[in-house]
Each structure stands twice: as C-alpha cells, then as structure tokens.
Image (spheres, rainbow, N blue to C red):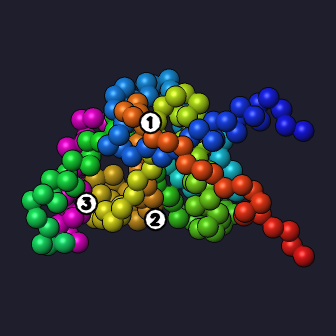
Amino acid sequence: MPTDAAEVLLAHMRARSHVAPKRLEAPGPNADALNLIFSAAAQAPDHGRIRPWRFIVVPQDKREALGHAFVQALQARDTNANQTELNTAYEKAFRAPCLVLAVLSHNPSEPQVPAPERLISLGCAIQNMLLMAQALSIGSGITSGQAMNALSIRELFKLHTDEDCVCYLAFGHVMAQKPQRTRSEPRSFVSVLD
C-alpha cells in the first residue's frame, strides 16, 4: 500500500527534468547541498561493494583548463574546425555553476563484477543525485559528447587506464522552467511473461 513518503518521492521523480547546463545559473549547490547530493549517490546498488565509479568536481578556477581541453579534443577529431566551433567548445566549460564528471572504473575486483552491472550502479548513483537535487530545488542536467574520453580530457582529469568518463552532471538555479514532458504509463512498457 502506498505511503505518504512514496507519494512524495514519486512527486519529486515526476517533477525532475533535464536542464541544459547553459540554462543553469548561480547559485549552485552550497557545500551542504553538494554533500547531500553525493550522499545520495552512495546509496546506489553496488554488487560486491566495489564502488565502480567516482565523481570529480570541476571548480571555477579549473574551468579555463577544461575549456582548453574541450578545444584540444575538437581539434584532434576535426582538424578543419573553425574559430566559431572552437569558441563554442571552449565556452561549454563555463556553463552551469556546478559541474561534476562521472567516471566509471573497470579495474579488476573480487568478486569480478561485469561492466553492465558497474554501469547500472553508476546510473543509479546519478539518478539518486538528480533526485536529491530536485528535492533541494536545484536544477540538474546530464551531458556527454564526443570529447568524453579524448586524450586532453583524460589527461586533465588524471584518469587511470581502466577508467572511462561517462558524463558530466550540471547543477544550478534554473533560469526558466520548461513545460513538464509527458511520462509513459507503466502499461506501455511492462508485460507479463506468458
């Protein structure tokens, strides 16, 4: 039987929506809110208790370095990129007041946990973070792209050879709310084995 807590949780899930980093402005989450967001990540399922993921916060004083890494990544994959494209790549580093990189680990573990289970664990951690941000009235969004595992990005974040960048999480104040999208009803994606 549904409880009041379940209804509140579902309401936060329904209210949560992706907000592009360029539509997020200061203030971002303060230290206490960010701690709650990361504490929510720690509640994710974790087969074998190996925590096959980690998060790296990109502080404001490192945004310029990230912008240059984005430019280098674009130049590495497109030697004909024009100045407008290079400027756009650079500027992406300065969107959203709080930017966090999600990293997935493939390092050997005991027990050995397959890659899909590791990715599911990271996905659950990210969803928990997004829901906590929603509960705190903080906007959030997920971005990725072709530069995710470019050499310049990997070097900037000092990734190990058995780690992959998966996405960036952006947090901040929503400049303008967009209409809520229609969510699927369970009957549209649930069936019973017969």
Residues shaded magenta: 59-77
Towards the viewer: 49 or 126: 126
Secondary element at image label 1: loop
Vertically, is 106 above or below 92? below
Give the x, y percent position of residue 2.
Answer: 85, 37
- Alpha-carbon neighbours of circle 2 within 10 Å: few (<14), some, or many (≥20)? few
Look at mark 2 in the image and give the residue it sits on.
162
Amino acid type, callout 3: Ser
Marks 1/2: CA–CA distance: 39 Å
Q: Earlier in the sequence, mark 1 or mark 2?
A: 2
- Alpha-carbon neighbours of circle 1 within 10 Å: few (<14), some, or many (≥20)? few
Give the x, y percent position of residue 177.
Answer: 44, 36
Amino acid type, callout 2: Asp
Secondary element at image label 2: loop
Q: How many marks?
A: 3
Q: Quadrant of residue 155?
A: bottom left
> Is residue 72 highlighted in magenta?
yes
Tell me the residue at 22%/55% (across/down).
89
Marks 3/1: CA–CA distance: 34 Å
- Identify the mark at residue 177; answer none if there is no mark: 1
Towards the viewer: 117 or 189: 189
Give the x, y percent position of residue 25.
Answer: 34, 32
Look at mark 3 in the image and give the residue it sits on.
152
Q: Nearer the viewer, mark 2 or mark 3?
A: 3
Q: Nearer the viewer, mark 1 or mark 2?
A: 1
Vertically, is 77 above or below 167? below
Name the outermost residue toward the left: 83
Marks 2/3: CA–CA distance: 16 Å
Secondary element at image label 3: helix
> Is residue 52 highlighted in magenta?
no
